[in-house]
Image: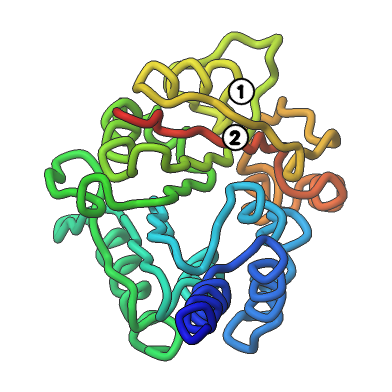
Amino acid sequence: MMFAMAGVIALAACAATTSTRTTTAASLDRILAGDHRSAENRARDMYRHPRETLLFFGIRPEQTVVEIWPSSGWYTEVIAPLVQGKGKYYAAHVPPNPDNEGVTRALKNYADKLAARPDLYGGVTVTALGPGSTADIAPPGSADLVVSFRNLHNWMARDFAPDAIAAMYKALKPGGVLGIVEHRGNPAVPQDPKAANGYVNEDYAIRMIEAAGFRLVAKSEVNANPKDTKDYEKGVWTLPPRFAAGDVDREKYAAIGESDRFTLKFIKPSGK
């Protein structure tokens, strides 16, 4: 009887530390409502749907998660607190470049953001991904989930997409998940290999990612926006938050909102 009771206690303890979709959703709700997020960042939740997007990718607090090119840390504010103390968060930022003032400033701002809230970001490890960088974005085969938000067009512009996808594949465990969100192009328009307007055709992206060994397992329309006509002179950056056309038709573009986006879930096949 004592052995049986010990087994029940052990199972209960295990269950208590294993998150479900429901408990993860509740944790995300608390984080998204946290005072560490600015009003400006919260205002974008209606376009980026962070709760629904991350749950679709299957995120859990116990996971090792790699975010590619976190920029100013919009998603860092959500993912890093979720896995703090239970899992691990790697921020694969752009590589340092002393000759590029913009890159240097961006990396410093990101480092300052992490240092300001060690209670939320103390477990973050910053790595690098970009042309010229040879370091791993995370220990090979260690990641449960790799996520990238609106970066594919940037890699295409730099002829870096195959290398970026290979780095993500290397970091993931067999059976691990790659989650991709990207500005969705017009399928009636042939894909520009450089994605100069910021849009990527969904089928083109799938073929490119599956060519690296990944397998598509699910699609979501959570970040879709049928108002986006994708035919702007200044590309996707015409829309908020950039408003690349300045005050020209600003109200029109504000009414459209942020871009139409595909949301894709891939796995690294087991045994690979």
- Quadrant where the image shows the C terminus: top left
Q: Are dots 1 and 2 in contact, CB under 8 Å?
A: yes
The residue at the point 63 percent across, 78 percent down is 31
Residue 102, placed above or below residue 180: below
In the displayed structure, does residue 18 sit left or right of residue 228? left
In this view, the mark in front (1 or 2): 2
In the displayed structure, does residue 177 sit left or right of residue 56? left
Quadrant of res 202: top right
In the displayed structure, does residue 46 sit left or right of residue 74? right
Could you tell me residue 261's position as x and y percent?
67, 37
Q: Residues within 10 Å of mark 2 (few under 14, many from 20)?
A: many
Nearer to me, 214 or 257? 214
Amino acid type, label 2: Leu
The residue at the point 42 percent across, 75 percent down is 86
The residue at the point 64 percent across, 63 percent down is 20
Q: Mark 2 falls on what kind of element?
A: strand
Q: Residues within 10 Å of mark 1 (few under 14, many from 20)?
A: many
Q: Along the polypeptide, which appears first: circle 1 or circle 2?
A: 1
Q: Which mark is residue 202?
A: 1
Q: Which mark is residue 264?
A: 2
Could you tell me residue 13's position as x and y percent?
51, 80
Quadrant of res 203: top right
Residue 13, placed above or below residue 48: below
Q: Mark 1 falls on what kind of element?
A: helix
Quadrant of res 249: top right
